[in-house]
Image: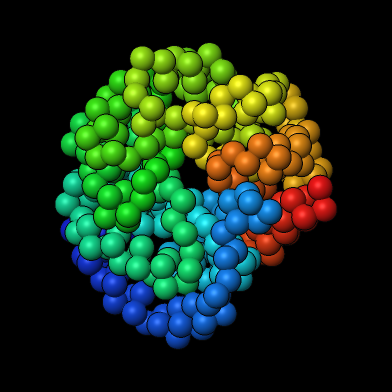
Amino acid sequence: MPTKISRREAIRGAAAFPLLLASHNVVRSQAAAANAGTTPRFHEGVELGVQSWCFNDRPFDEMVAGLVDVGAGSVEMWSGHVEPLRQLRQDREELRAWRLEVDLEKFRQARRTLDANNIHLSAFNISMRSNWTDAEIKRAFEMAQALGADLITSSSNVSTAARIDPFARRYKIRVAFHNHAGIKPDEFATPEDFRMGLDGFSDYLGINLDTGHFTAAGLDPLGFIREYHERIYSLHMKDRTKNNGPKVPFGEGDTPLRQILLLLKQKEWKIPAHVEFAYPADDRTAETRRNFDWMKGVLTTG
């Protein structure tokens, strides 16, 4: 069982974050030089990237190195790459306190590292849930602001939208709600859930459609994108089979990923599409690259 650390130790560790990154200057400079003059963010007019959850087995600096290795010019950054979730998630109050007390320089430094590697921060992924206090929700927006992010993706509750919208309007940062395959009360899964979470609120609230989960729930992601593209601010590209089937490599499941990519290309809709695979893999970098290159191939060959 992992050793539990105190809130004070976690915050002290966060303060050391810039020093940790400084030890990787050589990696950053080599990556920046390799990427200099390139525009890997767009492929055939479509923004392709990686949800950093793909690298949930490693710390921030190694995640960035993985993005460079894959050749991704855009990232939706999972909060676990800047928050001590593994250490503090067993104690909800300690994690809440960490969020309220951490030095936001940690987040500004993270953005500088992404910039040094020519990686665009498409969104900050942090899940603001119904058990969050208003102070904690406010802090999530301050984190996003420190990162320079104009979009938060969030696995929130439907009922939480009413509390999030005022902060989104105040900070002028959009929030896109993420869906899962399980159809449960107060969780985003179906088109009706999204309607309940968006109707009556500002356009700062939108959708982060997980295409694989939508498919696994027996729904049609392609038709949904056609109908709601103006409120879809981000896509998670994931291949799953129907009837809550498993997550599989791109092109092997029932999710119409090819048709979705070609629709984005044809319509020129500026909706970022990020790889988020979640099946077991011995080499997560190689598997991320495999799926990322699959998307590029679809856009190139049609």
Going by the image, does 42 lie left or right of 116? right
Figure colour scheme: rainbow
Q: Is residue 67 above or below residue 185?
A: below
Find the residue positioned furthest to the bottom. Answer: 26
Q: Residue 128, image x and y in percent?
A: 35, 35
Q: Nearer the viewer, residue 206 or 154?
A: 206
Which residue is at a point 48% across and 16% down the rendered structure image? 195
Q: Residue 80, image x and y in percent?
A: 41, 52
Going by the image, does 179 lie left or right of 298? left
Task: Tell me which corner region of the image, top left, top right, bottom left or bottom right, holds residue 253.
Answer: top right
Q: Is residue 215 visible?
A: no
Task: Tell me which corner region of the image, top left, top right, bottom left or bottom right, holds residue 110.
Answer: bottom left
Q: Is residue 171 above or below residue 296?
A: above
Which residue is at a point 57% across and 80% down the rendered structure image? 34
Q: Is residue 88 above or below residue 241?
A: below
Q: Residue 213, image x and y in percent?
A: 63, 32
Q: Nearer the viewer, residue 116 or 203?
A: 203
Q: Is residue 291 above or below residue 200?
A: below
Going by the image, does 251 lie left or right of 28? right
Q: Nearer the viewer, residue 216 or 267?
A: 267
Q: Which quadrant holds the N terminus?
A: bottom left
Which residue is at a point 27% across and 32% down the rendered structure image? 169
Q: Is residue 245 visible?
A: yes
Which residue is at a point 23% across and 43% down the rendered structure image? 139
- Looking at the image, how many numbered discs can be counted on the residues? 0
Q: Residue 254, image x and y in percent?
A: 78, 33
